[in-house]
Image (cartoon, grey):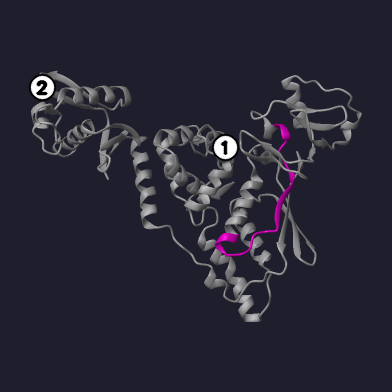
Amino acid sequence: MSIYSNILKNIYSLFLDEFDFSQIRDFWQNNLYQEKSVTLQEHETYSKLWNADSKTSFEYLIKIMNSLETFLLSNNITLTEFYEKLSKTCRFPFVPANLILTEIKPYLYAFYKFNTTATAFNLIYRLFRRYCINMNLLNGQTIFYKVNDKEANDYILQINYDDIIIKKIYFDLNTLFFKIIDNILSVLNMPDFKYMKCIHDVRPVYDILNGFCDNIAINPDFTFTINDKIYGRIIDAADKTENSFNHELHSKERYFLNKTITISEDYYCPIRKRIVLHKGCTYNSPFYLFLFSYDNQYKIKKQFLSEVIIESPKESSLDKHIIKHKQLLKICTKGTMLNYNKTHQKISINNKHLISGIPAKILRKIINAYLFEGRKEFSYHEFRNDPELNLDIFKPNLDVRINRLITKLHSECNEISLEKKERGKITLNVDGTIDLIEN
């Protein structure tokens, strides 16, 4: 089972925006891509993520989405904030422009050729369904119902996944679905849904709360409580004959995994900072069931196509991602990337701040001489007389500054070191390849 990886590319691109190299590597090293039972190397994983036109496995997408929220929370970012940043960073974070244009073509043709009035929701649903089928997010039997009323069209989407897929999904799939639909509406300049709800979820309550809330219980009256507050009720018929419940952790997990629970009140998780159990939703269901309601009065306009303004990412933004992606590839193939900021006179190694001021200028001089001339030996005299360093003539404090630089490199960088071998001279030692970018 495979998917087009544009979702993964945009997640990876936002990682390049939001995190330093050590954080990026920390996440993806634990989520290396597997291809035909072979685990790819780190740099191969990044190349796979970057190539959105290639295919990746659906199981890999599930693995990434399952791991994402825990990583984000450890870096003080909520899943909701991440999705919002994703929407702002990329014009088409989920649905690519060519797919939208491909799908609206038959509707526009029907509208202008036969003057029919295709409803807006039909267009939205076709885009959503086509995209999710391409992604295999709707893999399995899909059933679509429609309920009409005067002001809105209510639609119910049922997705029957097989048991193997259901057991692998721990992340909030409805949040992803709703974000895809929000993105479609935004791109097409259409009004928002009156509401979108998940009314059946395949995940057991225990899987959703495990690690985030310990005080959960099912009581003798079959109510479900969190921190002694009622949030729902079990609906399994077999549970009516049960009179006792073992509160030991292992038994609790096994007990909850088999229980179907309908939630009567939203549960807001203070750690995740979002609602994780939704009022009216039944969990541990054999299928997903989504309810959508869209304004029945809204029709596709004749000026519809002119309102769909396709904006490619700005070149500067694209260049920024490409540069950082290439830097990351160099780092994970034993390379070391240095960045010198001219404005603030500071230098960073692998996107992590190292040192600023005169020591940063000295290191910049040393690295440039090594890269362009192959030099490794340097004397204090050449630094003392260098006008770019702008040292005080009477108190240059050169020895103090070089000692500080040596100490910093020793504690912060294993690949680059400076060593004093003779009086007034230092030697550069480099392990692997290095590069220097100035901006």
Q: Secondary structure at mark 2?
A: loop
Estimate how packed mark 1 is, as few (under 14), some (14 to 19) or many (20 or more) residues with alpha carbons within 10 Å: some
Q: Secondary structure at mark 1?
A: helix
Is 429 situated above or below 157? above
Along the line of sight, the residue nearer the viewer: 173 or 102: 173
Which residues are drawn in magenta? 185-206
Residue at 85% in and 31% down: 222
Residue at 50% in and 32% down: 30
Q: Is 86 left or right of 16, judged from the image as shown?
A: right
Q: Quadrant of residue 328?
A: top left
Along the line of sight, the residue nearer the viewer: 125 or 349: 349
Q: Quadrant of residue 330?
A: top left
Q: Is residue 195 magenta?
A: yes
Quadrant of the drawing holding the C terminus: top left
The percent coordinates of residue 294 (x first, y second) are: 70, 62
Structural distance between the alpha carbons of marks 2 and 1: 53 Å
The percent coordinates of residue 156 (x first, y second) are: 75, 55
Instruction: Tell me the residue that label 2 is attached to.
Output: 424
Instruction: Tell me the residue that label 1 is attached to.
Output: 69
Comes first in the chain, label 2 or label 1: 1
The percent coordinates of residue 61 (x first, y second) are: 56, 43
Mark 2 residue type? Gly
Q: Is 77 left or right of 152, judged from the image as shown?
A: left
